[in-house]
Image (tube, rainbow, N blue to C red):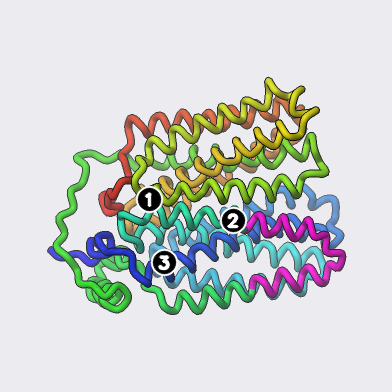
Amino acid sequence: MVSPGKAVEESRWKGVHSLLFASFSIGTTIEAYIYSISYIATSWVTIPRVLLALLAVWSPLWLLIGGMVAGPLSDRIGRRNTLFITLALYALGAVGLIFSYSYVLLLISIGLLLFSSGGEYNTILAATHELFPKNHRAKALFLELNFTNIGGSIAAVLALLEISSVLYQRIVLGITLLLSIMVMFIIRLKVPESVMWLESKGKLDQAQEELQKHYKIEPVQDDLKRPSKLPSIWFRIIVGGIIGWAYTAGFSLIVLTLGPYFFPSLTDWLILIFGLVAFASGFIGLVADRMPRKYMLLLSSLAVIISAYLFIPTLNIWLHNVAVFWALFVMVSVFINIYFLAEDTLKSEMWPTKRRGLYTAIVRVISLGGSIPVLFLTANLPILEYMWVGIAIFSAGFIVSVLWFFFGVETSQGRSVRIWD
C-alpha cells in the first residue's frame, strides 16, 4: 500500500519546509512575547487588590485552556485550519490590547491573547512532527521552540527601555503583534495541511493533492517497521506530564525567583540574559536528529539538578561576588533550556496521529496546571527552602526520565513518528 505520510517523512528539505519553519518560529516567538507582556501590561491600569491572586494564575490558566481547546480541535478540523483560527483570535486580542483603558478590558484582551498562544503552541508542537522529514523534524522543532527565548528577551528589552507612556506602550505592543500576525497569515496561505493527519482521517485523495502541490512528490510504498511493543498510553501521559511539570514549575522557582530575591535591581537583566544564553544553547538542535532523545533528556535533567544545587553551598560566595552568580546562572540556564527542548519534543511526538493534538494538550495541562499550586504554596518560603523545592521538582523530572530511558522507546535518529499509529 502506498502512503503519502511515508513520502513526507522520506522527503528531502524543500522550500515548503522553510516556509513552515518560518511560520512556526514566529509563532513560538509571539507565544513567549505575549506571556511576558501579560505581566508588563498589568502595570498599565489600577487593578483591585482582590484580583491580585487571580493575576498570579491568569497567564498559565489561559495558556492551559487554549491548548486544551485547540488540541482536540486540531485533531478534528486539521492543523492548518486551527492555526488560522488562532491567528484570528490573536488579531482580536492585539486590537483589544491597544484599547485596554480599564482592567476589565485588559484582562479580557490578555486572556484572549494567552488563549490563542496556548492553542497556537500546542498545534505547532503536533504539526511539526507530521510536516517535516523524519531526519529533520527534531532539528526543526528544537530550533522552533528555541525562539521562545527570543520572545522573552524582546519583552525584557522593552521593560529595560522604561517607556514612560502607557498609551505608547500599548500601541507599540499591539501594532507589533498585528504586523507579526499579518506575516504569519501570508506565509500560512502557502503551506499545506498535515498529510499524515489527512491520511489518518482516511482522506487519501486530499493527502495526495497536498503532497503533489506543496512537496512536489508522489506517495511511496509503506514499509514501516513498528516496535514489537510500545509503552502504554497511561505511561506516556505520566512521563509527558511530569517532565513538562518539572520544567514549568522548576524553571519558575529557580530562574525567575533566585535572582530577583537577592538582586532585585537585576530582574530585567536576568530575564534578558537567560533568554540570550538559552537561545545560544538551543542551537544544539542542529544535531538533535543525530542524538538519542533518551540520553539527551536524561543527561540534561541530571545536569539541571547539579547546576541548581551549586547555588546552595556557594551562597556566601556569590552573594558577595556577582561574577560568580552570573557564571552559575548562565550554566543553569543552558541546561534548563536543553532539558526544555528535549521534554517538549518528546511529549508531543509519542502519540497516534489522530489524537496527537489531544494528548499533547493533556500533558501540557498537567505541566501548566500542576505548576499553579506549586507557585501558590511556595510563595512565602525562605529562599533556601524555595531552592530545595525547585531541585526536588527537577529531581522528579529526572526520575521519570530514568523510567523512560529503560521502559520507553527511542524516538530520535531518524525514527518514524508514525510508529505510534
The amino acid marked with disc number 2 is Leu
| Residue ranking furthest to the top | 313
The answer to which of marks 1 and 2 sits earlier in the sequence is 2
In the picture, residue 109 is in which quadrant? bottom right
Q: Is residue 153 magenta?
A: yes
The CA distance from mark 3 to mark 1 is 15 Å
Q: Earlier in the sequence, mark 3 or mark 2?
A: 2
Q: Which residues are magenta?
A: 151-177
Dot placed on the residue nearer the N-terminal end, 3 or 1: 3
User: Which residue is label 1 attached to?
Assistant: 349
- Mark 3 neighbour density, 10 Å: few (under 14) some (14–19) many (20 or more): many
SS at circle 3: helix
Amino acid type, residue under disc 1 in the picture: Glu
- Does residue 183 lie above or below 287 as drawn? below
Q: Residue at x 43, y 33 (%)?
A: 298
Please tell me which residue is depicted at 48% across the width and 47% down the height of the picture: 341
Give x and y (percent) for residue 190: 41, 78
- Magenta stretch, overall SS: helix
Could you tell whether 222 is left or right of 77 in the image? left
The type of residue carrying mark 3 is Arg
Disc 2: CA contacts within 10 A as few (<14), some (14-19) or many (>=20): many
**Left or right, 171 with reference to 401:** right
User: What is the C-alpha distance between the residues marked 3 and 2?
Assistant: 18 Å
**Would you say residue 72 is visible in this rendering?**
yes
| SS for callout 2 | helix
* 298 inside magenta stretch: no
Residue under label 2 = 63
How far apart are the alpha carbons under marks 1 and 2? 20 Å
Quadrant hosting residue 214: bottom left
Residue 145, horizontal then vertical, whole percent: 51, 54
